Image (tube, grey):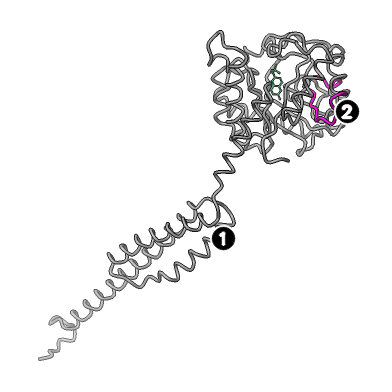
Amino acid sequence: MANRTLIMGVLNVTPDSFSDGGRFLDTASAIEHGMRMAAEGADIIDIGGESTRPGAQRVTPEEEQLRVVPVIASLARNGIAVSIDTMNAATAIIAVENGAKYVNDVSGGLADFFMARAVAATGATFIASHWRGQSATMDKQAIYKDAPSDIARELSQRVADLLADGISPDKLILDPGLGFAKTEAHNWQMLGRLDELMALGYPLLVGASRKRFLSSLLPDDASMDERDNASVAVSVLAANAGAWAVRVHDVARTHSALRVLDSWNRGAERPDSLVEERFLSAHQESRARTEALAEEIHDLSYDFDAELAIARELAVEEVTRTTVAGRVRDEIVRQAAIAAEAALAAEQQAAAEREAAELATASAQSPSDSSGESND
Ligand code: PMM
């Protein structure tokens, strides 16, 4: 799997899609739009024939298939990776037969009892979103104690069921299902705590593009262009949080923005020599602190050269492992503290022995000595 975050371009072949207004209902223009998104940098084109916007009514699988299959077949024939956005097992099967590599089900397999088994049989990759119910009623189901942990728990139960139905763990991708049975606040909480979904151990797809919770940040008369700015910002942040892919309408802008992020992160990589230099200067600091401590307890037996040799060894190890010098510095400070503590204990032990010896001498010289004899 690629290191960078992938871009999934949205291609809704519906007359009522809130985002592209059904402009691509016509098969030819849908194919053209898919090809354009691929040329602009989309890694996958997600083709859907049924709107999932809040309040949307379902269409028959036959109607859905008439809309999507010619588009899937044409894009797949042109070497483009295609995903079918459907809640119907029958549509998923026909889509894969016509070249789709991914089955993207916003219901995570809950809307159609046969979905998981059907997808498992095709060998396609399954993308399962968090979902609580059909679009017509989902807004009423947006009730959570703590949205991110509730969503993670419900998705993890879904994962167990999907695996039991035969989906292979290396062919499973999860999605928080932004906007599905979630209020604006729930969506932001989920985005801010994506790591909690990441902890389930599956790649994450994030689809925030042009969703209602973004438009509420903008003026009522905001243009599509302004909505896309907000979508691009969310995509960059999701990518930076480790998302496997972002599902977007504006592929060209997302592509440039993700290239910025990529360059930024590569710029942040520290050269090995710098890590070593920082490490050694951290060591010098901790040495100075230990020296002061050792002086305080009048014990100068601490072997700094041996310590430095260990530090250098640790530095070389750390440089090969990570660019974060903090842990190494912590280790040095820890070792210095152990040495200082040992020195203090030795000093205390010596003091106790001195005291015991003095006591013994004093009691030997005492007139009340039990022998009753005098040294006079
Ligand atoms: N959102 C929509 C449709 N399909 N699929 C996934 N995996 N994740 C989503 O968030 C998602 C989806 C609804 O948005 P649209 O009408 O713009 O396609």
| Residue lying at 72% horizontally and 33% vertically, measured from the top left | 173
Amino acid type, callout 2: Arg
The residue beneath circle 1 is 317
Q: Position of residue 246 (x, y in %)?
A: 67, 28
* Numbered label attached to residue 357: none
Mark 2 or 1, nearer chain start: 2
Above or below 234: residue 286: below
The quadrant of the picture occupied by the C terminus is bottom left
The residue beneath circle 2 is 77
Q: Position of residue 297 (x, y in %)?
A: 28, 66
The quadrant of the picture occupied by the N terminus is top right
| Residue lying at 15% horizontally and 81% vertically, measured from the top left | 366
Q: Nearer the viewer, residue 183 or 34?
A: 34
Mark 2: few/some/many CA within 10 Å (<14, 14-19, 20+): few
Question: In what element is the residue under mark 2?
Answer: helix
Q: Nearer the viewer, residue 58 or 253?
A: 253
Above or below 372: residue 67: above
| Residue lying at 61% horizontally and 16% vertically, measured from the top left | 225
- In the shown orientation, is residue 204 left or right of residue 116? left
Above or below 340: residue 359: below
Amino acid type, callout 1: Glu
Above or below 144: residue 255: below
Q: Which residues are magenta?
A: 73-91
